[in-house]
Image (cartoon, rainbow, N blue to C red):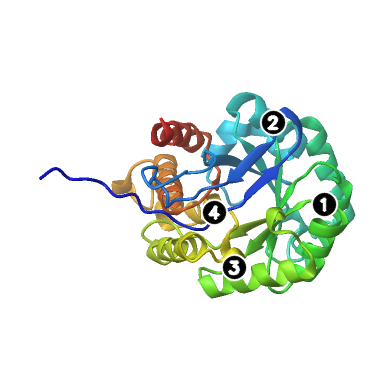
Amino acid sequence: MAYNKVAKKYNGKISEVVIGTGDKAITIGGRTALPLHSFDGAEGQTPKLGLEILDTAPTDWIDAFNGIYGDVQNDASAWAKLVEEKYAPDFIYLRFIGADPSGDNKSAAECAELAKKVAESISLPLAIGGCNNVEKDAEVFKAVSEALEGKNILVVSATEDNYKTVGAAAGLAYKQKVGAESSVDINLAKQLNILLTQLGVKKEDIVMNVGAATVGYGFEYVTSTMDRILLAALGQNDVTLQMPIITPVSTEAWSVKESIASEEDAPDWGSTEERGIHMEISTASACIASGSDAVILRHPKSLETMKTYVQGIIG
């Protein structure tokens, strides 16, 4: 007897979120079926790929990046322009590590001025990250959101500890997009979405960052969390979880020993740069297969490979 495939139909839909303005604006989300399950429904917008830059020259990146970027690492606006013209990601992720109170302790005003210069040097959508100090990040995100009003940026990290400040400034006062960051737990993700919407931020202005891990480093928790979120959002029509997902792969993939151990310390492992690229590609592709609507990468070779991957899964 012939096999007849019965499509699995879901009641829910992931909302679409627009980031950026003009011809280069991107839309993420929109799926009505699980990832790679086009036979069950719409897969939504093509997964988007971002490339990470910093507000100041990195001190903890492997030496290979000096050969790729050189002196532009000292000028974020020049760095952003080079990335757009040479590597053409879907968006640029500008992370303000220089704001860290334990480091350069740049003021929020300094960060806002730099963000304006970066935004003026590119036409790609811009996502903004912080230094992982929740109080300082809230100050920086507020100032940057004001400085870039009208640019429709994505402020990646509103957490349970600073969502009121970040949500009120980015999502309400200056009409930017807000990234709700939680720690690999469906209940925490849902709670933060509820808190932001109760604050007044629209569902269509929220993107979830549900946490990340490099493959081999607890990634099963990440993929199972995404699975649970999508099954609740689509199958149970849970509107509190129907926001698209962005995953900052770069910071995770380039922090594990396989990506940073020197060739002198691990001679049997081969090229440090190649190891890091492999870890980043493996993690990014797994995230997209698990439900990420956008991923953030660091190495241009990873971006190039992931473009091929994305084209392959939608072809």
Cα gap from disc 4 to disc 3, whole angstroms? 21 Å
Cα gap from disc 1 to disc 3, whole angstroms? 22 Å
Q: Which residue is mark 1?
A: 175
Q: Quadrant of the N terminus?
A: top left
Q: Which residue is mark 2?
A: 24
Q: Which residue is mark 4?
A: 13
Q: Which residue is mark 3?
A: 182
Q: For marks 3 and 2, give the one nearer the viewer.
A: 2
How crowded is the residue under tag 2: few (<14 C-alpha within 10 Å), some, or many (20+)?
A: some
User: Which numbered disc, 4 or 3, marks the residue that appears first in the sequence?
Assistant: 4
How crowded is the residue under tag 1: few (<14 C-alpha within 10 Å), some, or many (20+)?
A: many
* Amino acid tagged 2: Lys
* Amino acid tagged 3: Ser
Residue 254, percent from left and from top: 50, 51
Q: Are the residues tagged 1 and 2 within 8 Å (C-beta)? A: no
User: Which numbered disc, 3 or 2, marks the residue that appears first in the sequence?
Assistant: 2
Cα gap from disc 3 to disc 2, whole angstroms? 28 Å
* Amino acid tagged 1: Lys
Cα gap from disc 4 to disc 1, whole angstroms? 23 Å
Q: Is residue 220 above or below residue 277?
A: below
Secondary structure under badge 3? loop
Q: Is residue 33 visible?
A: yes
Q: Left of 87 or right of it: where is 140?
A: right
